[in-house]
């Protein structure tokens, strides 16, 4: 038996925060070494952070990345362990997204990414060039200051693998796995047994099984050890990277990291038998035939061993059941972790949410409540970084820290019901009840005086006063009156967010949370510059149907029982007067149900249907 101990990780990296990123990289290497691993894989672009965007165009970004790599190589971090480090590299006039493979204080080779992610949320072609030369490895001259510090002038650069005495190892970077002809197929035929996939993959509802199926499929028919590393958390943008580092052997998952976590560093390890890989390949006739006439891939030879022989003290990692979260859990934990990262990195002291008592704003409130629960739980589990951040944000004195989620919510979460003459008592009470269950600091504000003042000013300027449709007004008047209320709420929300901390003698400011779902954005059923115009919106990519399922789940699993009544209530904006024979309803205003709108959304986004194709379907 050839036993190999490998380690991969989830890292919570911050875009352009080199000091923090280096701290996490070093911590992951320490964990890997402590576990006895001889290979350590980190996420894509882990040195700089994945979401640097146009900062990648700055030469300083690349220079700082080299400085960080030099620090790793001059220390003992890479001693007796193969480390794959993600960073940008400039070769000639081109900038590449690379994995730098290092061991024993030397750079063994630099592997540039060949298939760039350039759809959906990704724009890698804006900053990087895809490596298109699949032939011989080229010589890359290291920057002078790096070369002098390491006493190493050049390294192999390009597509290839590392041949050790006892096994072969190669990198496959993120998007390459999902390309029509993935590199791992050709590399396997060349004898590569260990594949390292460094990724920067964001969270999307119901996406994890697609990713895991790709890892398992990569090694099911051709054998191999497939390692996957990912960033985890919000690195400053709108995306949440959802971790789930894993190790797959011959199509079976033997180790899986968390998908949602507040940890900055999470390392998973596995003890694998490479002879099992060789045995599987030897049993597949088609693999043998294709390997006999393969296209040869370049390699770099390293005269050292990575594996150990079998002994009774070693235990092989066995296949395990894959952990999948339900969509409702994904809605709870993904945005909650994203909000925590955004909060602690923004310098804000908390959140302010206009809470109407409806499904959307109540979903956002429940997600913030979930965030508070996760923070308290992680502190109880001994996470000192979460504890330090929570004490700073919550403005705790001396040795105090959060031990109760409701108490913590009272310190960092304001909810405001901004009612008008058109608001019902039922929504007002539901908003207060939910705020009490979460522990938020709740305010009840009537905006009629502000709206009336604006209408009086309008009447003074124009000589006319608009009326609602139910009172004989036109559609133009009716819409204008609704928009005035919605926009006054936005102005008041931002004013409260900036001044309430001052009122309560707290430092900082509050971030205003929005609560507009993806269906309303698709339909255009929203008011520009209303409560959807917030600092951040944690439900902006989630459909109304999924949110309703989440509300039912959260009522039981998060302990916010009022959510059951909120979900059951018909959706209404409450911007028009309530009469005995008339009550405003969202679905009547839109001319379609949310269920129908959700179907349209899936047809447009997933199946790429235009109006004619939708009609035909």
Image: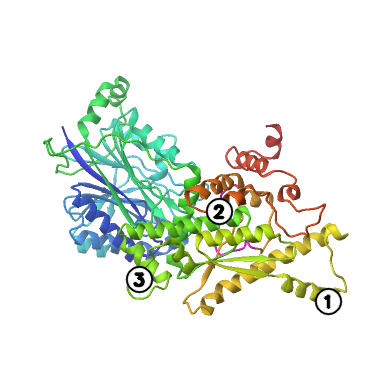
Q: Determine the CA span between mark 2 and mark 1.
A: 39 Å
Q: Position of residue 115 (x, y in %)?
A: 42, 44
Q: Position of residue 280 (x, y in %)?
A: 26, 26
Task: Give yes or no for residue 8 being in the magenta stretch.
Answer: no
Q: Quadrant of residue 454?
A: bottom right
Q: Which residues are magenta?
A: 531-543
| Mark linked to residue 400 | 3
Residue 114 in sight in this render: no
Q: Position of residue 608 (x, y in %)?
A: 61, 39
Q: Determine the CA span between mark 2 and mark 3.
A: 32 Å
Q: Is residue 201 above or below residue 220?
A: below
Indicate the quadrant containing the N terminus: top left, top right, bottom left or bottom right. Answer: top left
Q: Earlier in the sequence, mark 2 or mark 3?
A: 3
Q: Quadrant of residue 273?
A: top left
Q: Determine the CA span between mark 3 and mark 1.
A: 56 Å
Residue at mark 1: 461
Residue at mark 2: 539
| Mark linked to residue 249 | none
Q: Residue at x 39, y 71 (%)?
A: 392
Majority secondary structure of the magenta segment?
loop
- Numbered marks: total: 3
Of the residues tagged 3 and 1, which is closer to the observer?
Answer: 3
Q: Earlier in the sequence, mark 3 or mark 1?
A: 3
Question: Which type of secondary structure does the marked residue at label 2 adopt?
Answer: loop
Mark 1 crowd level (few <14, some 14–19, many ≥20, 10 Å Cα): few
């Amino acid at each position: 038996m050839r036993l190999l101990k490998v380690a991969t990780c989830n890292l919570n990296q911050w875009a352009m925060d080199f000091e923090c990123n280096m701290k996490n990289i070093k911590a992951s290497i320490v964990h890997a070494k402590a576990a006895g691993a001889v290979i350590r894989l980190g996420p894509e672009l882990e040195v700089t952070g994945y979401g640097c965007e146009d900062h990648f165009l700055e030469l300083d970004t690349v220079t700082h990345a080299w400085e960080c790599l030099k620090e790793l190589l001059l220390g003992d971090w890479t001693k007796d362990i193969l480390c794959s480090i993600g960073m940008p590299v400039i070769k000639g006039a081109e900038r590449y997204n690379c994995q730098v493979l290092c061991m024993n204080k030397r750079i063994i080779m630099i592997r540039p990414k060949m298939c760039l992610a350039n759809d959906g949320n990704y724009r890698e072609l804006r900053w990087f060039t895809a490596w298109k030369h699949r032939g011989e490895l080229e010589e890359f001259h290291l920057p002078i200051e790096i070369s002098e510090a390491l006493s190493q002038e050049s390294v192999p650069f390009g597509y290839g693998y590392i041949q050790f005495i006892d096994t072969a190892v190669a990198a496959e970077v993120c998007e390459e796995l999902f390309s029509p002809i993935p590199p791992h197929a050709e590399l396997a035929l060349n004898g590569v047994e260990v594949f390292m996939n460094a990724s920067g993959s964001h969270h999307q509802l119901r996406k994890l099984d697609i990713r895991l199926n790709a890892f398992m499929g990569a090694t099911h028919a051709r054998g191999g050890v497939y390692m996957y590393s990912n960033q985890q958390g919000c690195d400053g943008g709108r995306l949440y990277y959802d971790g789930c580092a894993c190790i797959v052997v011959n199509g079976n998952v033997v180790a899986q990291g968390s998908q949602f976590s507040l940890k900055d560093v999470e390392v998973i390890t596995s003890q694998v038998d490479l002879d099992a890989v060789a045995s599987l390949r030897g049993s597949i006739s088609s693999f043998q035939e294709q390997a006999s006439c393969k296209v040869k891939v370049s390699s770099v030879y390293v005269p050292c061993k990575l594996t150990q022989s079998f002994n009774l003290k070693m235990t092989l990692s066995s296949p395990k059941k894959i952990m999948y979260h339900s969509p409702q859990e994904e809605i709870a934990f993904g945005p909650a972790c994203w909000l925590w990262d955004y909060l602690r990195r923004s310098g804000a002291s908390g959140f302010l949410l206009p809470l109407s008592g409806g499904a959307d704003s109540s979903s956002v409130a429940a997600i913030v409540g979930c965030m508070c629960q996760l923070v308290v739980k992680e502190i109880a589990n001994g996470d000192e970084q979460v504890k330090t951040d929570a004490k700073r944000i919550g403005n705790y004195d001396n040795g105090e820290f959060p031990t109760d989620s409701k108490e913590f919510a009272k310190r960092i979460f304001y909810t405001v019901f901004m009612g008008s003459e058109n608001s019902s008592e039922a929504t007002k009470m539901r908003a207060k009840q939910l705020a009490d269950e979460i522990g938020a600091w709740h305010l009840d504000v009537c905006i009629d005086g502000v709206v009336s003042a604006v209408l009086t000013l309008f009447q003074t300027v124009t000589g006319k006063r608009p009326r609602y449709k139910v009172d004989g007004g036109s559609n133009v008047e009716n819409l204008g009156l609704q928009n005035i209320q919605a926009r006054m709420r936005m102005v008041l929300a931002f004013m409260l967010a900036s001044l309430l901390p001052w009122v309560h003698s707290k430092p900082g400011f509050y971030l205003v949370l929005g609560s507009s779902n993806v269906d309303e954005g698709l339909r255009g059923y929203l008011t520009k510059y209303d409560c959807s115009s917030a600092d951040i919106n944690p439900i902006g990519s989630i459909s109304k149907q999924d949110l309703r399922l989440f509300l039912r789940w959260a009522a039981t699993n998060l302990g916010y029982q009022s959510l059951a009544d909120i979900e059951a209530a018909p959706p209404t904006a409450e911007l028009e007067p309530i009469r005995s024979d008339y009550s405003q309803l969202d679905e009547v205003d839109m001319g379609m149900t949310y269920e129908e709108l959700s179907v349209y959304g899936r047809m447009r986004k997933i199946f790429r249907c235009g109006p004619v194709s939708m009609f035909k379907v």
